[in-house]
Image (tube, rainbow, N blue to C red):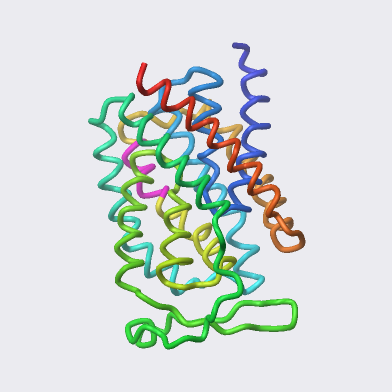
Amino acid sequence: MDIQLLTLILFAGAILAGLLGSITGLGGGVIIIPLLTLGLGFDMRFAIGAALVTSIATSSGAATAYIREGITNVRIGMFLEIATTIGAVVGALAAMYLPINVIMLIYGVVLVFSAAMMVRKKNVDGDFMSPTDPLAKSMKLNGTFPVENGIKNYNVHNVVGGFSLMGIAGVLSGILGIGSGALKVLAMDTVMKIPFKVSTTTSNFMVGVTAAASAVIYLQRGYIDPVLAMPIVPGVLFGAFIGSKILMKINVKILRIVFAILISLLAIQMFIRGMS
């Protein structure tokens, strides 16, 4: 394929990846990896390397806006990053020895899970002020987030359970290069009872650190190709910027449903490729 056409395709795909990644909190890899493997025929590990760069860029592009708006809980993000970073290094090392078809099958399962996560009932109007976890109180993890009528308080629950799930999310991120945003949001939204918008934006904040830990391993093994990464980074940053503006102003429920259907179809393709 002509290098200019490849660059244009990657740039356009990266804009879409950044847009959807910042809105859903899943990270841009859920678009980039299928684009490179199923669409353009690149090796899975090179696709994962490019996706890790994508996840770092998505997080960097969206996190600043969300922190400025006062939604992201930076304290929770920095605490949970301990688990995800350790898990990411373990996962990246494991990925070097796993067969490609096994990685594709795992990726397909994670995509199906991510799709289910996007259409499930969100923790939007729950009782956020129910008694907090004593550990959360001692670590000052409870916080506030902006709503239409001002500021709303929330308490954090089950810190140990959320931390444990974050370790698993980190391992999957290291193996698949997709940030494992769905599992991170599940840990914060369902297990720790954090409001969905806070969970999504805090996941975005964390994705970049998790991906960076994995990217070091892939870079050392030669699986991050500058030709693939260079057009992806600016595209993802542009898409993430647009996505952060959309999330603040409109209801993205329909977009989430459409995206869930799309990644379910991609999951089926991954299953077929992994079993062939």
Decide: is 81 above or below 26.
below
Q: Is 4 positioned to the left or the right of 118 in the image?
A: right
* Residue 274 in the image, given as x and y percentages of width and height: 37, 23
* Residue 192 in the image, given as x and y percentages of width and height: 42, 71
Residue at 30%, 41% in the rendered image: 92
> Foreground residue, 170 or 52?
170
* Residue 124 sits in quarter: bottom right
* Residue 27 in the image, given as x and y percentages of width and height: 52, 47
Which portion, as a residue range, is magenta? 211-218
> Foreground residue, 16 or 209?
16
Q: Is 4 positioned to the left or the right of 132 in the image?
A: right
Q: Is 105 positioned to the left or the right of 96 in the image?
A: right
Residue with the most extreme top position:
1
Q: Quadrant of the N terminus?
A: top right
Per the picture, the main secondary structure of the magenta-coloured stretch is helix
Decide: is 93 above or below 85.
above
Q: Quadrant of the C terminus?
A: top left
Residue at 32%, 25% in the rendered image: 100
State yes or no: residue 184 in magenta. Answer: no
Residue at 57%, 49% in the rendered image: 58
* Residue 140 in the image, given as x and y percentages of width and height: 42, 84
State yes or no: residue 213 in magenta. Answer: yes
Residue at 45%, 46% in the rendered image: 113
Decide: is 190 above or below 28.
below
Number of numbered tags placed on the structure image: 0
Decide: is 75 above or below 31.
below
